[in-house]
Structures are given as C-alpha cells and as structure tokens.
C-alpha cells in the first residue's frame, strides 16, 4: 500500500521536474550557432592581431615618436627633456653640406651596387633557367652570400681591399698596376662598399628572377623557337618583357636597401664618419653620427624622416611606372 502510493507520487512529480521536450537541445543549438558566428567573424582578427601588435609597438610608435622628436631639440644625455623648435631641424639639414654629401654618397653607392647587381642576377637566373647539371647546388650556392652576416662579409672584404696586404692589390700588382688606397679614395671606397652589397644580394635577386622565369609559359618559347629565334633573341623578346614587373620590384627594393645602407660602410672603415673626408658616409651613417656621437636626437630624427620621405617618393615612382606598364598591356 505504501509502495504503490510512493510510485504514484513519483510518477506525478516526474513530468513537472523534467524539461519540456526539445527545450534544452534547442537552447544549446542556438548557443552553438552563436559561437560559430562569433568564431567565423572574430577569429581572423585574432589570428592577425599579433602582427598588428608588434607593428604598433616596433613600427608605428617609433615612427610617430621620431616624427615628434624631429620637431624638438633633444639631447641623448636627457632624452626626456624636449625643447620645441618646429621645423628648424629640417631647415638646418637643407643648409648642411654633410647631409648633402651623405645623400650624394648614398645615391652613388646605390647606383654602383644596384645596376651591376641586377644585371648579373638576371644573367645568372637565365643560365639556371635552362637545364643545368647540378642546378640545385648552384641555387643553394647563390643564396649563401645572403645568409652570411653583414659583419662577417664586410670584414672579409675590408681585408681583401686592404692597401698594403689586400688580395685585390696583390692581384693588381701581378698584372703591373700600383697599389690602390681603396678606403681613402672617394670612388675607390664607394666601389669597395658597392662590391660588398653586390656580393651579398646578387644571388638573392637571381632566385627571384628564376622564380619569375619559371612562371613564363613554355608555349611562348616554343613559338619563338618555331619562328627561328635563338636563345638570345628569346631572352630579349620573351623573357625580359615577361619579367618587367619583377624587374621593377627588385629595382625598388634594391633602391630602398641602398637608401638605408648602414652596416657595410660602418664596418668597412670602422668609423661613423665614412672615411676621413666623409667620402663614403651614407645617410644611415650620418644619422648614426648625429644621434649617438653628437648626441642630437632631434637632428637624427629629422634625418630619419628625410629618409622616410625619400622612400615615399620612390614608392610613388614605382606606382606610377607600374600603372603605366599595366595600361600599356
């Protein structure tokens, strides 16, 4: 009698305590769909957030702070104290002969290093593009100079271009020429610094050209061969036109690298002045001298922003040329 009463009571209570059919699964499904929408909407931003955080900390903030410091008189001894001077640091640059000398040296070294470098890179890529025995070895060998540190490469070249015991002068002496004082001459020192840049970056650009060449359709070469074109003619009339965007890209990147040239001239002579007569002092070295030897952080910041404006001009020229090439097509 008691057991049946208890079972009946339990049976009456069960429907009231159990959830409505389909209530909880439907709520869980809504939550799952909401999480899926949030995941699809916000996950891409979470994935790229580290890049923007690092860029803001180490790229954007230094750029803005340097721009602010360029409008002040700031000493390295007391960087927290800033005295507003407006555009005085920039106007002094326009009247500074050392700034124009550094700009001229940067341009000269850039031309001496960029033009031969890209011409040799294009030729090496053309040789590797055809079937060559041991091509994998040569591709790895081309990238070896790029993997070498700037310090190691520059110190080796400084010994090669030594005045008294350098191997370059030893070779010149063998063929009847006198020793050349590479470091103290204007053109000779710039040629020596350019040689370091050429050695380090030729292989890197050659691999870029090689990758672009491999993307050119073989049908174009076959059609040119059927028309009787030699390999040389195929190179000038098929390969080079197809590589115009890539060549433009490497020219711009090499120009930007030449504008920021710092390690090679610094380690070549071991001085921030770029030689006794500032004969190979680049903009990077001049910035370094003003900020860390003359303790004028405001002037150094103005030089940095002048370099930044030069790079913007280079980017605009690249955009105009790219647009013209695109419209011609």
Image: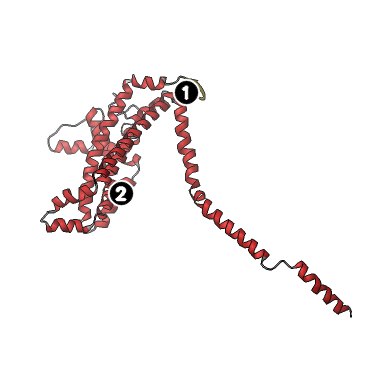
* Image position, residue 194 (x, y; %): 26, 36
Q: CA distance from mark 1 to mark 2?
A: 42 Å
* Mark 2 neighbour class, 10 Å CA radius: few under 14, some 14 to 19, many 20 or more: some
Quarter of the picture containing the N terminus is: bottom right
The answer to whether 67 appears left or right of 144 in the picture is right
Label 2 element class? helix
Packing grade of label 1 (10 A; few <14, some 14-19, many >=20) is many
Is 37 or 116 nearer to us in this picture?
37
| Residue 100 location (% of width, % of height) | 30, 24
Tag 1 secondary structure: strand
Compared to residue 56, the image places residue 231 above or below, namely: below
Query: Badges 1 and 2: C-beta atoms under 8 Å apart?
Result: no
At 31% from the left and 27% from the top, the residue drawn is 102
Residue 132 visible at all: no
Q: What residue sits right under mark 1 in the picture?
A: 74
Quarter location, residue 252: top left
Q: Residue furthest right?
A: 1
Left or right, 73 with reference to 232 = right
In the image, which disc is placed on residue 210? none
> Is residue 228 visible in the rendered structure shown here?
yes
Q: In the rendered image, which quarter is residue 323 located in?
A: top left
Q: How is the image coloured?
A: secondary structure
Identity of the residue drawn at 77% across and 67% down: 17
Q: Residue at x 22, y 30 (%)?
A: 187
Circle nearer the viewer, 1 or 2? 1
Label at residue 144: 2
Residue furthest to the bottom: 1
Does 244 sit left or right of 272 as displayed? left
* Residue 326, x across and y down, in percent: 27, 44
Give the x, y percent position of residue 294.
41, 23
Tell me if residue 213 comes above or below residue 6 in the rendering: above
Residue furthest to the left:
228
């Amino acid at each position: 009698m008691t057991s049946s009463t208890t079972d009946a009571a339990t049976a009456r209570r069960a429907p009231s305590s159990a959830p409505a059919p389909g209530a909880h699964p439907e709520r869980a499904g809504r939550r799952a769909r909401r999480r899926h929408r949030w995941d699809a909407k916000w996950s891409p931003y979470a994935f790229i957030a580290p890049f923007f955080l690092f860029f803001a900390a180490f790229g954007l903030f230094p750029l803005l702070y340097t721009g602010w410091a360029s409008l002040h008189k700031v000493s390295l001894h007391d960087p927290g104290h800033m005295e507003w001077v407006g555009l005085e640091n920039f106007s002094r640059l326009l009247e500074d002969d050392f700034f124009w000398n550094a700009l001229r040296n940067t341009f000269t070294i850039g031309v001496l290093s960029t033009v031969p470098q890209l011409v040799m890179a294009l030729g090496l890529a053309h040789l590797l593009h055809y079937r060559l025995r041991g091509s994998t070895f040569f591709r790895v060998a081309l990238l070896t100079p790029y993997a070498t540190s700037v310090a190691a490469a520059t110190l080796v070249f400084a010994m090669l271009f030594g005045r008294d015991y350098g191997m370059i002068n030893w070779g010149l002496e063998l063929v009847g020429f006198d020793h050349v004082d590479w470091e103290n001459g204007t053109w000779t020192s710039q040629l020596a610094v350019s040689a370091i840049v050429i050695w380090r970056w030729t292989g890197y650009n050659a691999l870029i050209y090689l990758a672009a060449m491999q993307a050119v359709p073989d049908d174009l070469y076959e059609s040119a061969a059927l028309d009787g074109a030699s390999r040389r003619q195929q190179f000038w009339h098929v390969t080079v036109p197809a590589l115009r965007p890539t060549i433009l890209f490497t020219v711009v990147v090499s120009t930007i690298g030449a504008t920021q040239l710092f390690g090679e001239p610094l380690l070549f002579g071991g001085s921030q002045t770029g030689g006794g007569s500032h004969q190979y002092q680049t903009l990077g070295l001049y910035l370094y001298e003003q900020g860390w030897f003359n303790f004028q952080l405001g002037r150094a910041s103005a030089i940095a922003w002048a370099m930044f404006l030069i790079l913007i001009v280079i980017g605009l020229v690249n955009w105009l040329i790219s647009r013209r090439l695109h419209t011609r097509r």
